[in-house]
Amino acid sequence: MTSSQNVEALEVLSSGIPTIRCSWGVPSETGLATNVSIVDAPQAAALLTAFTNSGFSCQPIEGGTMCVFGQTVIDQDDNIVALGESHVLRGNAWISTATIDFAPDGYTEDIVATLWG
C-alpha cells in the first residue's frame, strides 16, 4: 500500500527523496500507510498544485497546508470501501497518508503536533 494514489505524488515518492515509512495492519482489506518525507521547494509547490487540481480540500495547519480527499468505491466483490488520503506540506516536510477502511480521528494532526508542537 502506498501513501497516495495521486500520480504526481507517486512520482515524487519514487524519485528517491528521503522518507520514513510506517504502515498499520497486515495485508487485508483495511490499512493505513504514512510517509514522512523531505522535499525541495519546487516539489512541494508541484505537490500542492497536484492536490488542489485533483479535488483535494486544502486548508492551513500549523504553519503549513493540509490537503485531504476521501471517496467511497465498490470493490470487485461488491463491497463498499472507504478510501482516504491526507497530505501536509510545511517547509521541506511532506507527510502523506492513505487509508483503506481505517481512518483514526486526528491521526495526521497528531503527527503534525509531534513534529512541530
Image: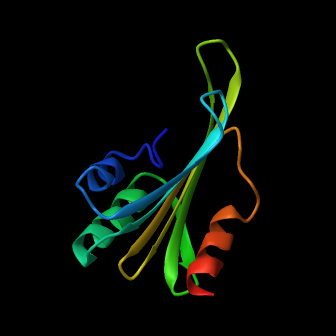
Residue depicted at 64% across the width and 27% down the height: 28
Residue depicted at 61% across the width and 47% down the height: 70
Q: Is residue 58 left or right of residue 110?
A: left
Residue depicted at 64% across the width and 40% down the height: 31
Task: Give whichever of 52, 66 is nearer the camera.
Answer: 66
Q: Residue furthest right?
A: 105
Quadrant in the picture for the C terminus = bottom right
Vertical comparison of 104 with 115: above or below: above
Vertical comparison of 65 with 79: above or below: below
Q: Is residue 66 left or right of residue 30?
A: left
Q: How is the image coloured?
A: rainbow
Vertical comparison of 85 with 43: above or below: above
Vertical comparison of 81 with 5: above or below: above
Q: How many marks?
A: 0
Task: Give whichever of 4, 15 is nearer the camera.
Answer: 15
Residue depicted at 69% across the width and 63% down the height: 107
Quadrant assignment, res 109: bottom right
Q: Is residue 99 visible?
A: no
Q: Is residue 44 visible?
A: yes
Q: Position of residue 12 (x, y in %)?
A: 28, 56
Q: Position of residue 106 (x, y in %)?
A: 73, 65
Task: Give whichever of 50, 26 is nearer the camera.
Answer: 26
Quadrant assignment, res 17: bottom left
Q: Is residue 20 left or right of residue 113?
A: left
Q: Position of residue 62 (x, y in %)?
A: 58, 85
